Image: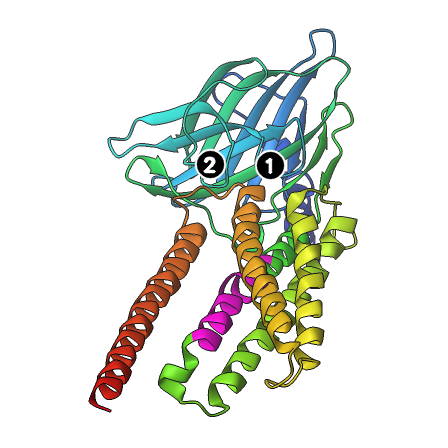
Amino acid sequence: MASSKSLFVSFLFLSFLCAFAEPCGNRRFNEGKTFDSCNDLPSLNCSLHWNYHSLSQTVEIAFRRSSADQQSRWIAWAINPESKGMVGSQALVAFQRDDGTLAAYTSPITSYATQLEQGNLSFLVDGVSSIVKDNEMIIFATLALPANTTTVNHLWQEGPLVGNVPGMHRLSGPNVGSMGTLDFLSGKIVVDKSSSRIHWKIVHGVLCTFGWGFLIPVGALTARHGKQFLGPGPAWFHAHILCQCTAYLMGLAGGIIGVLLWLGVLGARIGGGSHQYIGITLLCLGAIQGIVGYCRPHKEDKNRFYFNIFHYSVGYGTIGLSIANVFLGFHMVHFGTKTWPQLTYIAAISFLGTIALILEGVACWKRINASKSTLKHQIVV
């Protein structure tokens, strides 16, 4: 009796191992479709099935995601013929509408702000369809691959629905690293380890935007109008130095990360361009400004006039380059004007500009009143 129980337990254990040895290979499609190859993707409970036809250079695919909540989610699988990133990828998208009908279509992704709008892909696609069954959503399609190409950069993703429109997927966890390379001939899938590179890009953007793009203008505003509110003492000067030093240290840290990203130390190498060159220029200008400011002549020195011209010119030039480079950075990562990072920055800079105009108006009013008082005093005398 004990041996029978042992055999039964062993049988269950072996059945369990077999069931999980090749899960996607055990999947049978009731739609009359069969696939010779499959692979369980490493994240988001997804798997990919395919038949590769070498003579016609086509591949039939079935992209499958298992989830208990399919009605409020969209799924997508894409090939990027140009790079390993999201922008430039050619996607197959599916979701269930509010009325229960299914949407299955193609969507070329040209921006991080995409809402997965329907459009034609850069290669031929036929037979795009989808089904929902047993807590699974599946996309079917046939793709035409470029000649002599079997390995592609592919991505898979899922996200929430806002009404009947795909919303933004999560920007952390498995949603960030769901990409890699796929060889349709050998079946080999290599997951791209670029999630850390994406995190470093976010850190670089936050540091440089807040440091160069926000604190530097705040420091300049403090220097120009600080005496009106902090008095003629050294308080305004200390506040100015604190802002500029903090901004430069944040910009320096962000700049170092940017250079490492540019050189490929923190992942795949990012191509050079005006954003990188302006960033290096800003680091140099900030260092020069700090050194010259530390060695500034006394107020009574005749060279103080030339120092002021240099200090103001480099300072305001740095502010202009900083703001321009922030927007170039947004453009590099394909953030549209209506995306929240760019809208937040536009609102912050607009707020600073409004404050600057108000303070200039107050300062001008005070100067006019002071001139009138002086003139009255002279007339009385």
Q: Is residue 339 above or below residue 359?
A: above
Q: Name the magenta segment's main secondary structure.
A: helix
Q: Earlier in the sequence, mark 2 or mark 1?
A: 2
Is 240 left or right of 81, judged from the image as shown?
A: left
Looking at the rendered image, the disc whose residue lies closer to the viewer, 2 or 1, is: 1
**Residue plotted at (62% across, 39% down):** 85
**Residue plotted at (56% across, 57% down):** 322
Is 19 left or right of 326, judged from the image as shown?
A: right
Answer yes or no: do the residues labelled 2 and 1 have beta carbons within 8 Å? no
Residue for badge 1 = 155
Is residue 70 among the parts visible in the rendering?
Answer: yes
Q: Position of residue 193 (x, y in %)?
A: 71, 49
Please tell me in which quadrant of the rendered image residue 288 appears: bottom right
Residue lying furthest top: 55
Q: Looking at this view, is 195 or 190 the one in front?
A: 195
Q: Is residue 83 above or below residue 50?
A: below
| Residue 97 inside the magenta-drawn segment | no
SS class of the residue under badge 2?
Answer: strand
User: Which region of the structure is painted magenta?
Assistant: 205-224
Q: Position of residue 73 (x, y in %)?
A: 39, 41
- For label 2, the crowd category at 10 Å Cα-Cα, with few meaning under 14, some 14 to 19 and many 20 or more, is many
Q: Position of residue 376 (x, y in %)?
A: 22, 84
Q: Is residue 381 above or below residue 251?
A: below
Residue for badge 2 = 75
Three-letter residue code for mark 2: Ile
**Alpha-carbon distance for marks 2 and 1?**
11 Å
SS class of the residue under badge 1?
Answer: strand
| Residue 207 inside the magenta-drawn segment | yes
Three-letter residue code for mark 1: Leu
Q: Position of residue 362 (x, y in %)?
A: 29, 73
